[in-house]
Amino acid sequence: MTEQKLLDGDDNKKRETSHFMIDGMNCKCCPVFNTLGIIGKKFTLLLLRNMIFLKQKRFNEFLNSIEEINPKTLSIRLKELEKDRLIKREVFNETPVRIEYYLTEKGKALQPILEQMALFSMKFCCEMVFENPDPAKIDKITSKSFRKYSTA
Amino acid sequence: MTEQKLLDGDDNKKRETSHFMIDGMNCKCCPVFNTLGIIGKKFTLLLLRNMIFLKQKRFNEFLNSIEEINPKTLSIRLKELEKDRLIKREVFNETPVRIEYYLTEKGKALQPILEQMALFSMKFCCEMVFENPDPAKIDKITSKSFRKYSTA
DNA sequence: CTACTATAGTTAGGTAAGGATATAAATTAG
DNA sequence: CTAATTTATATCCTTACCTAACTATAGTAG
C-alpha cells in the first residue's frame, strides 16, 4: 500500500502525459510515439526506403547500399521488421540459397512518411541534397517527385 | 591516380550508392538520409511533436511530458535542434529565469512528417492507439485528424 | 580430397549513445 | 541565513551500435 502510494506519487511527477481524442475516440497512446516504436531505430527507415523505392529484397543488396550499415545491425533490424509485420522473409532453396524480404501492406503504408521526409530535405536543405539546386524547380516539388529514386 | 583507382574499387564494393534525379536535378545525397540526420535521433520527433501540437516551449514542460526522456538527453537534443535551425532559444530575465524554445519556419515544416506518422499508427495499429477503436471512424481518419492533440 | 566461390548471416570485443541520479548557478522570498 | 524555482550539467553505469573476423551450407575447380 505504502509502496503503491509512493509509485503513484512518482507517476504524478513524471507522467503527466497528455490525454487526447481523435475524431471522438479516446487515445491510450500517442500515435507518433507508437510509430516511433516501430520505425524509430537507426537504419530502419533506410531499409524501408530501399525496399519501397529501389525494390531491393536481399540481405547483400541492403548491406552494400545502405549508408554505413553493418551486417549485425542489419540482421537485427530485419528481424524486428518481420516481428512488427512490416516485411516477410522468404527462403528459396537454390544454390547458393536465396532469401528475399518483401513488404507487407502495412510496410507499404509507410511510403507517405518517407515521401514527406524526402520533401522536407528537398525544400529546406536543397543545397545538401541537390548538386545544382534550381530555386524555380524546387518550388514545384511535391511528394510525388521522390517516387523516381533509381539506381544507375 | 592509383590511389584514386583503389578508392574507386573500394567504393564499388561498399558504396554502390544509388544516383538519382528529382525533377531533372541531380542529387548528391538521398533526401530521406539527409532528413534522418536532422530528426533521426531518439526523442527529437517527440520534442517537435510537443512544440508543434501542444505548443510547449519550456525545458521542464518537455522533461515532464515526453515519454521517459532525461534532462541530459533533452539538453543535448535542444542544442542539436538549435544548431540545425529548427528551433530558437530565447532567454527572459525574470525570476526565476525563464527560457523558451520556439519553432522556426523550418521546424514547423516538419509537421506533415509527424502527421503521416500519426496517421500510420491510427490506421495500422489502432488497437495500440485507441481505447475503443471504431472501424467505421478509423476509415475516415485523415492527417488533419491529428491536429487536435490536447493536454487535459 | 582440398581449395575457392557465393549467400546469409553470427560472434567477440570495443566504442559511443543514452539512462538515473545528484548537483550547480542564478535569483528572490521569507 | 535557508528554501524554492528554473535550467540545466556532472558522474557513473548500462544499452545500443560498430568493426572485424568467423560460421554454415552448397556448389565448383583442380
Image (cartoon, coloured by chain):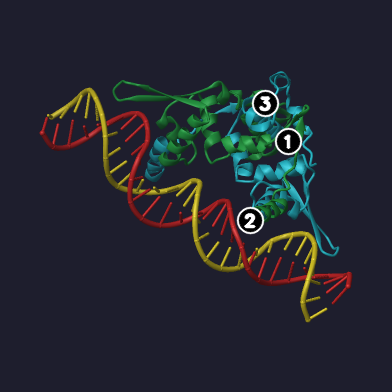
Chain colours: A green, B cyan, C red, D yellow
Query: In front here: A18 or A127?
Result: A18
Q: Amino acid at mark 2?
A: Glu
The Cα–Cα distance between marks 3 and 1, rounded to whole angstroms, is 14 Å
Can residue A53 be seen here? The reply is: no
Q: Amino acid at mark 3?
A: Ser
Q: Of discs 2 and 3, which sits in the foreground?
A: 2
**Chain of the residue under label 1:** B
**Chain of the residue under label 2:** A
Q: Mark 1 and mark 2, same subunit?
A: no
Q: Residue furthest front?
A: A1
Answer with the quarter of the image where residue B23 lies.
top right
Badge 3 element:
helix
Q: Of discs 1 and 2, which sits in the foreground?
A: 2
Q: Mark 3 and mark 1, same subunit?
A: no
Query: In front here: D25 or B12?
Result: D25
Instruction: State yes or no: discs 1 and 2 in contact (Cβ < 8 Å).
Output: no
Q: Residues within 10 Å of mark 1 (few under 14, many from 20)?
A: some
Residue receiving disc 2: A3
Provide residue B79's location: percent of width, then percent of height: 68, 54
Q: Amino acid at mark 1?
A: Gln
Residue receiving disc 3: A143
